[in-house]
Structures are given as C-alpha cells and as structure tokens.
Amino acid sequence: MFDDAAIERAAKALDYLNAGDVWDERDEDERELFREDVRAVIAALKGGRKVNIKDFLLDRITADEDAAHKLALSDRRPLLSIASTVDHPERILAECAAKRKLVEEYGRYEMYYGPKLFYVLASVYADHPDYQQEWAL
C-alpha cells in the first residue's frame, strides 16, 4: 500500500513539527492537533508492522519533550537545581536529552552489545500500545 519512502516523509514531517523554533507559543494547540494527525498517518502507513525499538524510544522521548514544553508554558517556577527538582520542565528536558543521547550513541554499537539497554529504557513505557512484550526484561 505505502512504501518506506512515504513513511519516511511522514516521519520527517513529524520531526519538523517537533522543532520548537518553527512554531511560536500561541500556535501550541494547533501544533499538537497537527502532530496527532501526522502520528495517525504514520501509524496507518505502517499498517501494523512491528515497531523498531529505537524508533519507539525516540518517539516516546519526543512525546515527553512535547509534554515538558507544554508544562513550561504554565509552570513559571524558577529552576533552583536540576538535580533536586524532579518535576520541573527543565529537569524533564534534561532527562529526555540524556535518553536521546543514549539511544543514538548506543545504537551505533548495538550489534556488539545487544539491545538490553533499549529494553531497560523501553520498560518505562510498557503500558504504551506500541510497546512489545518481547522487550520485557
């Protein structure tokens, strides 16, 4: 029905949406609706194909970043310390950046070390519909 190139184009559209510098804050609601539409198109294009664990993790990290950016619009508390303020948007974004770096860097060496790190990171999202039981530890 749809080829991998179509899925890749839809994924790039989602990446564009996730780039915060192309949307200003007043468009956040519209951006979120459009993002949901693009995710639905990607899911339809994939048509039930198994989700790659790295893509799954990067999608979840992006969703967490989006939630943190949305939280930042209403949470005006000053950040005293990233280490001690676990529910602050900046802390959430710092954790997302660390997870993203792990997925991207570790992915280069996965053939040597196996996917266990990815399984550990994915376990946080075990209740997500795209989570696969084969990833459970």
Image (spheres, rainbow, N blue to C red):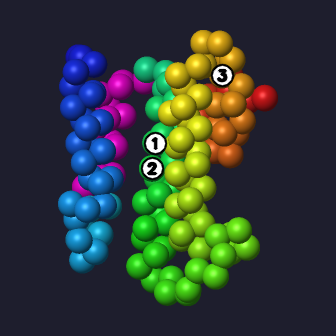
For disc 2, the marked residue is 62
Q: CA distance from mark 2 to mark 1?
A: 5 Å
Q: Amino acid at mark 1?
A: Asp
Q: Nearer the viewer, mark 1 or mark 3?
A: 3
Quadrant of the rendering where the C terminus is positioned: top right
Residue at the (27%, 19%) spot, across then down: 4
Q: Magenta residues? A: 34-48
Q: Amino acid at mark 3?
A: Pro
Magenta segment's dominant SS is helix
Q: Are marks 2 and 1 in contact (CB under 8 Å)?
A: yes
Q: Amino acid at mark 2?
A: Thr
Q: Are marks 1 and 3 in contact (CB under 8 Å)?
A: no
Quarter of the figure with residue 26? bottom left
Q: Which mark is residue 115?
A: 3
Q: Earlier in the sequence, mark 2 or mark 3?
A: 2
Q: Earlier in the sequence, mark 1 or mark 3?
A: 1
For disc 1, the marked residue is 59
In the displayed structure image, the side of residue 85 where residue 11 appears, left or right = left
Quadrant of the rendering where the N terminus is positioned: top left
Q: Does dot 3 land on a helix, a strand or a loop? A: loop
Residue at the (30%, 36%) spot, across then down: 11
Q: Does dot 1 land on a helix, a strand or a loop? A: helix
Above or below residue 31? Residue 40 is above
Viewer-proximal residue, 45 or 75? Answer: 75
In the displayed structure image, the side of residue 20 where residue 50 appears, left or right = right
Q: Residues within 10 Å of mark 3 (few under 14, many from 20)?
A: some
Residue 17 location (% of width, % of height): 27, 52
